[in-house]
Amino acid sequence: MKKAGSNAFTLSPQKWVNTTNAKEIYVKVGRGGETFAHKDIAFKFASWISAEFELYIIKDYQRLKDDENLRLSLSWNLHREISKINYQIHTDAIKEYLLRELTNEQLSYKYASEADMLNVALFNKTAKQWREENPDLKGNMRDCASINELLVLANMESYNAVMISKGMEQKERMIELRKLARMQLLSLEKLNSIGFKSLEDKTK
């Protein structure tokens, strides 16, 4: 009997799987059959053949991992750049819409629902107006809102409930909600800006 550990010892992949119930090896039998193994097993098999072949396998594996890491790095940088662009677009939108005062018409209008009143206080338009302006977009205005806007909207809903319980008129509540939206969105955008700067410093 030939001893395991010597190069003369043989054990087919299929017998290895059947004998040890190994999950690290996959054997496809028949025409076009293939054998796949965990990298550690593949490395040891290469060393069993020759040191030169082992070095070749290791170097080729490292090359594949380097290529993979490069693709992941490029993808991460792309997402970061897109996030920075979206952040700038969102900041510009705040400057254009949120920092200006609500019109007398917006304040005086009797909104049919509290949801529409909140939409105008935060987004400067009702759900119907948004839909007319964006007929090709799926979902509704809130589905297309940013994370910051949704967070502020949740706070506005809670604050609005408190003001309703105090008997405040809709116009008065709308003014207060606008102040809250402006303050909180600007604070969140400032935090985003600090986060991007910190991220950039870490990647330099």
Image (cartoon, rainbow, N blue to C red):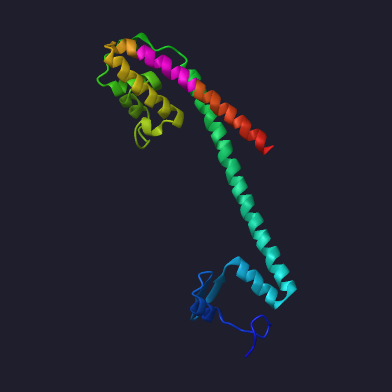
* Residues shaded magenta: 174-186
- Is residue 53 covered in magenta? no
Q: Is residue 20 visible?
A: yes
Is the stretch drawn in magenta largely helix, strand or loop? helix
Q: Quadrant of residue 173?
A: top left
Residue 51 left/right relative to 23: right
Residue 161 left/right relative to 85: left
Q: Nearer the viewer, residue 57 or 86?
A: 57
Q: Quadrant of residue 111?
A: top left
- Spot occupied by residue 51 in the image (x, y as percentages of width and height): 74, 73
- Spot occupied by residue 92 in the image (x, y as percentages of width and height): 52, 23
Q: Is residue 88 visible?
A: no
- Is residue 175 covered in magenta? yes
Could you tell me which residue is drawn at 64 percent across and 82 percent down? 4
Q: Quadrant of residue 162?
A: top left
124 versus 56 height, above or below: above
Could you tell me which residue is drawn at 27 percent across and 16 percent down? 165
53 versus 117 height, above or below: below
- Spot occupied by residue 10 in the image (x, y as percentages of width and height): 61, 84
Residue 61 left/right relative to 137: right
Q: How many marks?
A: 0
Could you tell me which residue is drawn at 65 percent across and 69 percent down? 43
Q: Nearer the viewer, residue 105 or 186?
A: 186
The single residue placed furthest to the right in the displayed view is: 52
The single residue placed furthest to the bottom in the displayed view is: 1
Quadrant location of the N terminus?
A: bottom right
- Spot occupied by residue 146 in the image (x, y as percentages of width and height): 44, 31
